Amino acid sequence: MKKIFSLLTLLFVALIIYLAWPYQMPSFTPEREYLDMEEQIFEAFILAKDSSTINLPEGHFLFSQSLSLDGKKNITIKGMGMNKTVLSFKGQTQGAEGIKITNSQNITIEDLGIEDSAGDNIKVSDTDTITLRNIRSAWTGKVSSKNGAYALYPVLSTYVLIEGCEAIGSSDAGIYVGQSQHVVIRNNKAFYNVAGIESENSSHVEIYGNEAYENTSGLLIFNLPELTIYGSHVNAFQNKIYNNNIPNFGVKGSIVSAVPKGTGVVIMATQHVEFTNNFVSDHKTSNLSVVSYKVFAADEDPENTALSEAAEAQGLRAIRSDYENDTNYNAYPGKVTVSNNEFKNNFRFPTLSNDFGKLWYFKNGGDIPDIAYDGILPKGTKLQDPDVKLCIQNNENASFVFLDAANDFKAFSNDLTPFNCSLN
């Protein structure tokens, strides 16, 4: 009996140590030897003519101000490779972005590294046809909420292609596309960000062949209120999303700062989403969640939802408890398919750092679900109504929880039967 008691005591102590052990935030610390070509490269951007190429040489270059193009057509900005041509904005004194593209058409940026801007490393807005290819966009040193929000940031644009890139250290999302249409995000890597990849209020989006790991959350497919454009028709397939468990270092009050660590994928308030043939594993909160905006808007404490003017100017979105005032906004997911994915989890205990992890202890026997659905519906609708339907099929015995969050979890269930359906 004493031996059994001693063993149980050791196991209990080991569990406490495991849960309480301080996490060492990751860092990206490449060696750099900077060359002074700021004036020449800045001038190349200023004097760039339509249908020309800005060729950037090999080397590490330090800049005090943003490089920008406005109202240009058919321009290529080309380096010698993401490891060979590195543009650093460490200590930037003018502008917020590293490279800023506005009101342009058919722009390509490729084969370079960009680091440490005061705001976003590459921001593209109001541009038709933008390609970001073979770019490493990063903040160096230990990850911090002082890092810029977005590594790669196309917004309000059409025909966006992001491929072969790496995003590191963003305090919001590494690869982010917002309020854009006809988007392809493929064959990229995202790590050490709050969100690895995010599609926000964007339509006709394909996300495939990517790796997202060691972020707070791997992939976010969001629709947010109080914006001019709302997204739908997002197809995510053949991605690897694993081990996204780092503490959330997002700017307090931003929507992404409310994403629990240990979240593989979140599909929130977006319609016509297909999540198929992906590999998702090893998350301490859940591998995949399908939720309404109400889950994020539940916090009524203004100290937790307020954003500074500077943060909002940078493109960060605050949590809006008054979202129902936006009559054009649909706060609920619908017509979502989760099928033919492989889910795994080597973690035996959910995190206690958020309410979902605690809920799994009290309502789910301590098991971390592969697929979690909040079950919050618009008034007057039922689970199988076409506009709110969620269909889950052929996910290799993935575990499932239906929260019934709108009713204090009264009908909390692991029964997948009501969701074994097809949208066809």
Image (cartoon, rainbow, N blue to C red):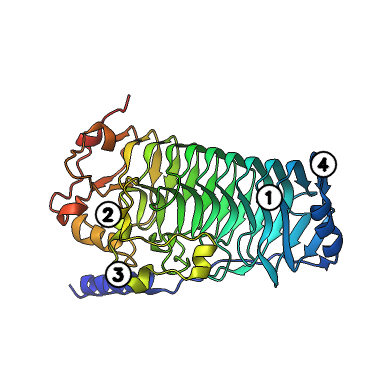
Q: Earlier in the sequence, mark 2 or mark 3?
A: 3
Instruction: Name the image quarter holding residue 84.
Output: bottom right
Q: Nearer the viewer, mark 3 or mark 4?
A: 4
Real-space Cα separation, disc 3 to disc 4, in angstroms:
66 Å
Real-space Cα separation, disc 1 to disc 3, in angstroms:
46 Å
Q: Earlier in the sequence, mark 4 or mark 1?
A: 4
Identify the element where label 2 is drawn. loop
Q: Amino acid at mark 1?
A: Ile
On the image, the x and y values in percent for residue 82 come to 73, 52
Q: Nearer the viewer, mark 4 or mark 2?
A: 4
Q: Is residue 57 left or right of residue 346?
A: right
- Residue at image coords 51%, 71%: 24
- Judging by the rendered image, the residue that carries numbered circle 1 is 135
- Residue at image coords 19%, 50%: 404
Q: Within 10 angstroms of label 3, few (less than 14), some, or many (20 or more) residues?
A: few
Real-space Cα separation, disc 4 to disc 2, in angstroms:
57 Å
Q: Is residue 410 above or below residue 104?
A: below
Q: Within 10 angstroms of label 1, few (less than 14), some, or many (20 or more) residues?
A: many
Q: Earlier in the sequence, mark 3 or mark 4?
A: 3
- Judging by the rendered image, the residue that carries numbered circle 3 is 11
- Judging by the rendered image, the residue that carries numbered circle 2 is 367
On the image, the x and y values in percent for residue 57 come to 85, 53
Q: Are marks 1 and 2 in contact (CB under 8 Å)?
A: no
State the mark number for residue 78: none
Q: Nearer the viewer, mark 2 or mark 3?
A: 2
Instruction: Name the image quarter holding residue 263.
Output: bottom left
Real-space Cα separation, disc 2 to disc 3, in angstroms:
18 Å
Q: Within 10 angstroms of label 4, few (less than 14), some, or many (20 or more) residues?
A: few
Q: Amino acid at mark 3?
A: Leu
